[in-house]
Amino acid sequence: MPELPEVETVARGLQMTVAGRRIVSVTLGKTDFIDDPSALETHLPGQSIERVERFGKFMLVRLRKEAASSTDVAGDSLLVHLGMTGHLSPHPVSEPPLKHTHVRFLLDDGRELRYTDARRFGRMAFLPAEKLPTELKRFGADPLEISEKDFVELLQFHKSRIKALLLDQSALRGVGNIYADESLWRSRIHPMRIAAKLSGQDARALRKNLQAVLREAIALRGSSIIDFLDADGEPGEYQRRHRAYGREGKPCYRCKTPIRRVIVAGRSSYFCPRCQPVPRIGRKRAIRRKTVTAKRGRTS
DNA sequence: CTCGATCCCTGGACGC
DNA sequence: TGCGTCCAGGGATCGA
């Protein structure tokens, strides 16, 4: 579940370990998660890794052609999404590849940058310089950089549930299920509240808490629930700090009320029913839905 | 615009 | 031990 803090951790690690290296060749395994596999084989060999950045939940590997005279001009890039189980890390070529290794970039120093992804929920795409700006415009603001004014307006203009909005990459880039739930718990906001109906005070608190949660998670190298390891293969520490996510039935850290789980925007959402009360409208809706699903037979 | 449902994919947890 | 089933979940897509 790499979200913003995990991807930031991996990107920083790769920046330290592979920036400046030249890609010698590309070896592909399964390619159904790659936009245009042959573009990787055609365009990557010979280019150098100028730097590795995070963009939302993507890693943006900025490349530089051998002959390029200046580093100011944006070059081609490789966009990598780790999905649920993706790993991107350098290994000595002598080391046998792990199971589910689908892409190997041979580097000019005798190492290989390997992409491993059991579930192949990740994505990889080569982006020529001229296509990068258009691609990046599909995404919303970085949650760590968005101003208070912009954040409050973003909420005002959306009638969706706040949880769905937080997860919407075209609204905010990088927030996933864990940090959405954690920031809502800290802000005492129920995940089903309508974004536009939140008070300005709630909206401002949510932004502050979201940013705090993300910064703290980055400082602890992210959460490693099951599948996530950073570029050095070290698990993150933030999962020990989770106050809502994954804690169904366990007591709320504030009020001891058991944490509950509901599905919002198709995702498990953990919240404290006492600290994060359901708004009146949401309550009516929830009851109506319950009646309907009871007739149909249920899913859990 | 926003919603839910469905699909993608594999491995871990759990029940028997 | 082994098998079947459920579940996790980001994102694309489709119909309501």
Image: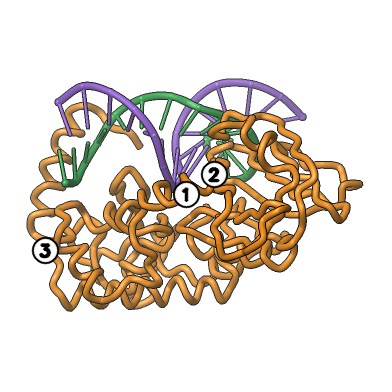
Chain colours: A orange, B green, C purple
Name the mark nearer the viewer: 3 or 1: 1
Q: Are marks 2 and 1 in contact (CB under 8 Å)?
A: yes
Q: Residue at x 67, y 60 (%)?
A: A69
* Of the pair A63 and A91, the residue shown nearer to us: A63
Q: Residue at x 8, y 50 (%)?
A: A284
Quadrant of res A25: top right
Q: Position of residue A91 (x, y in %)?
A: 81, 52
Q: Chain of mark 2?
A: A
Quadrant of res A201: bottom left
Check disc 1 and report the residue beneath it.
Answer: A132
Residues at marks 2 and 3 on the same chain: yes
Check disc 2 and report the residue beneath it.
Answer: A128
Evaluate whether residue A236 shows in this view.
Answer: yes
Residue A94 horizontal side relative to residue A15, left or right: right
| Residue A197, label in figure | 3
Residues at marks 3 and 1 on the same chain: yes
Q: Secondary structure at mark 3?
A: helix
Q: Position of residue A174 (x, y in %)?
A: 43, 58
Query: Marks 2 and 3, Cα distance to the nearest angstrom?
Result: 42 Å
Q: Secondary structure at mark 2?
A: loop
Q: What's under tag 2, amino acid-wise?
A: Pro
Q: Is residue A99 above or below residue A17?
A: above
Q: Chain of mark 1?
A: A
Q: What's under tag 1, amino acid-wise?
A: Leu
Q: Residue at x 62, y 34 (%)?
A: A39
Q: Earlier in the sequence, mark 3 or mark 1?
A: 1
Q: Residue at x 15, y 59 (%)?
A: A157
Q: What's under tag 3, amino acid-wise?
A: Lys
Q: Position of residue A200 (x, y in %)?
A: 15, 75
